[in-house]
Image: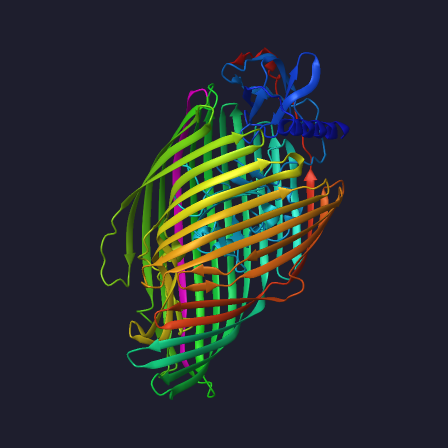
Amino acid sequence: MKNTRRFFVVALVLFVLSAGAQQTGRGKLSGKVLDSLSGSPLEYASVSLQEGSNTKPLNGGVTDNSGRFSLDGIKSGTYTVLVEFIGYTAARINNVVVDENKNAVELKTVYLAAKQSALQSITITASGKLVTNKIDKLVYNAERDITSQSGAATDVLKKVPQVSVDVNGNVELAGSSSIRFLINGKPSTAFGNSVADVLQSIPASQIKSVEVVTNPGAKYDAQGLGGIINIVLKQSNAQGINGNFSLAAGTRADNGSFNFNARKGTFGVNAFVSGNYRPALDAPVTTDRTSLDTAAKTTGLLHQDGTSHFNRYGFQTGAGFDWSPDKKNNFTGSFVYNRFGNDGHGFINQQQQLRSQTSGTMLSDVSSQSFTASNFWLHSTDASLNYKRTFNKEDQELEVAINSSFGKGHTTADNYQVSLPSLSRFYGNNSSNPGKENETEFKIDYTQPLRKDVNLGVGTKYTTTDILSDATVYSFQPSTQTYLPDRFLSNNLTYDQKVYAGYAELSFPMGEAFNAKIGGRYERTEIASFYSNAQQHTATPGYENFVPSVFLSRKLGEDGLLKLSYAKRINRPDYGELNPFINTGDPKNLSSGNPYLLPEISHRIELGYNRELGKAGSVSATLFYRMNERDIQPFVRYYSEFKVGDSVYTNVAVTTRENIGQEKNTGLMLFSDLHPNDKLSFRTNLMFFHRHTINEQNPGYNSTNFNYRFNTNATYQFSSTLVAEFFGNFNSVRHEAQGTYPSFITYSFAVRKQFWNKKGSLAFTTTNPFANYLTQKTELFGPGFTINSTRLVPVRSFGINFTWKFGGLEFKKEKEPVDNSALPAEN
């Protein structure tokens, strides 16, 4: 244990040296560090530069997640490079010559060999950063935030820079809700139904990190206007057997997870199981709608108040393997099963008044009660197989992958209305809507180094998506007091989409000024669809998209990084947006998907600056401009009469999804991670943006507004085993094409105590302990109507979490270590 602590002290000193007192020369030195057995990169290996017999490091740094390191500011001379990593034999490279007037020195790959001894049953605490800012993405290392282990994925995302989550679990990235969600870098059909349900069913204790890519490069799918959020689940590549167990119970959520990892030599397996349950609580809601019928010269007043009960649940399990038969070949595979859903019921007291616009006379006044019940479940199976091949030439690699996701869901709803005071049933229907969504993608990626620091990446991808929805509805017949099939509300949809894609991107230095990555992606989309209730059927034409991307980065001194990027993005409608099933649970407020939606197109420019402050933390600022064309938003229309088949709905609001027009956003995002001392740390995440919406659905209803979000996190380490945290989150009123959605404030406190040599921990958390509800007021308007609703969302919670880590880490010598001292330096 002393050696372990000594190693981290040395690594920390080296890191401080690399961020602070550097040499003043102009020479550069770089290289890569890999495991000698598996050939996998070693992240956070320390690299120090020594001169002559002086063992004091003159310069130093650590490797990134690809195993690469780069040292700058080196004077001309002959040096020794020392590479160290815990559990591995250190490598010493002698007689490395650096000449300031020549090109940067690129060392041959350094291979570290595992030590002979086994370190059994030890606990190693890495002092890595909570937030890592890379050239093309931001990584939030959730497993290093020890107070984030209770709750669900939704609670983790609240703390991620540039991400905001509302009280209903809806997520926005850089102000956009159009996000491409991935799990371990792979898509899942589960996200095509209810993102909020999926995120609230993944326990936070299951998450290793969250990767955020706001301007994805050509290698990434063009899908997702806001960018990509990749949730990386926990697994270990350490030798031996290890894992963890977590269990949380509370007033608003219960969850648990179990992870198991085993590795011997070049073969490893992992397995997990996790679950989440959120019990139902009362959520009162009040709605007032005013509508104008200019033809009949009447004004309608609809008042509704009631309470809903909603519970959610989720369950996941899966297994995977990782096999490296030699240093150049690696196979990985995984299988995951997900099931989640919700149940709800409620009632609404309703009063419908109709007045004359000319005289103000009351024409009708009808009171009624509505009762609803609903059930939704979805299960999906995700499977993947990957092959990666490296070559003798550094950075040359080939990767082939196939990923499939098969989802099946079912929604049922039952509702009826009774008149007051007679309590006689006059309306009702019940429905069943099973559906399927299957997606398979096959991709090939290849990277070819052309010369020093110049890499060409090319690849191709084929994706097929098949959607099936089949809705059966029975409507109540007041004359016979029976339910009969309703062929007009019943419908089915088949939607088959194929995407053919190819890309190329080139990474290269632009002299001494910038590092550049320029790419282009071509995507061809073909669609075959059938909607049973369409007036006529016409073939949907295919379309092409060329998606360019440009990234420029420049180091400003040793601690600053400036980034400029541009990317074009596309958002193809998903299952939930396309499903034409009409929800008539509330006959005064109908809703459905829109099978005729067109894809959105977005252009985004981003300028970012990041500065490392050594032990004091880091700060970053990002300016962005985003323009969306054919922007998709929820859209409400009012009808004095709305006919569905032979049923006529009067004074009804119909909500669907529409391409509303253009949306332009200009914003600034600020993030800081500050550590005034060894015990106290502050994190702040601020976002300000100006939004201009051009409403082509309702000309003349354009909007211009200002939005802002802010959250802060304060952590205090009382001792090595006791830590406390405060987290506060504020979102301003959100403006959309037809009105405003409410602001909100949430805050939480947490305290965690570790024991059993830090293998066990117990945490207490509470959210909004001084208020049972959040009051959410929404104001919507359009031609002929205004809607004002107030919803009380249960938010106060108390919970406790227990976590236990078991097993140890083993580092065993599998073959003779590579003698790196014999490797010459290359210019």
Q: Which sits in the foreground, 239 or 354?
A: 354
Q: Which sits in the foreground, 748 or 53?
A: 53
Residue at 69%, 40% in the rendered image: 806
Residue at 34%, 82% in the rendered image: 298
Q: Is residue 77 in sight in this rendering?
A: yes
Q: Which sits in the foreground, 445 or 738?
A: 738
Q: Which sits in the foreground, 80 or 390?
A: 80
Q: Is residue 47 in sight in this rendering?
A: no
Instruction: Specify whether 521 is left or right of 248.
Output: left
Q: Main secondary structure of the magenta part?
A: strand
Instruction: Specify whether 265 is left or right of 286.
Output: right
In the picture, which quadrant includes the N terminus? top right
Task: Count how many numbered circles sit on residues in the image.
Answer: 0
Picture coordinates of residue 439, whole percent (x, y): 39, 46
Instruction: Specify whether 120 is left or right of 636.
Output: right
Q: Is residue 1 above or below residue 667?
A: above
Residue at 36%, 66% in the rendered image: 472
Residue 201 on the magenta segment = no
Q: Which residues are magenta?
A: 426-452
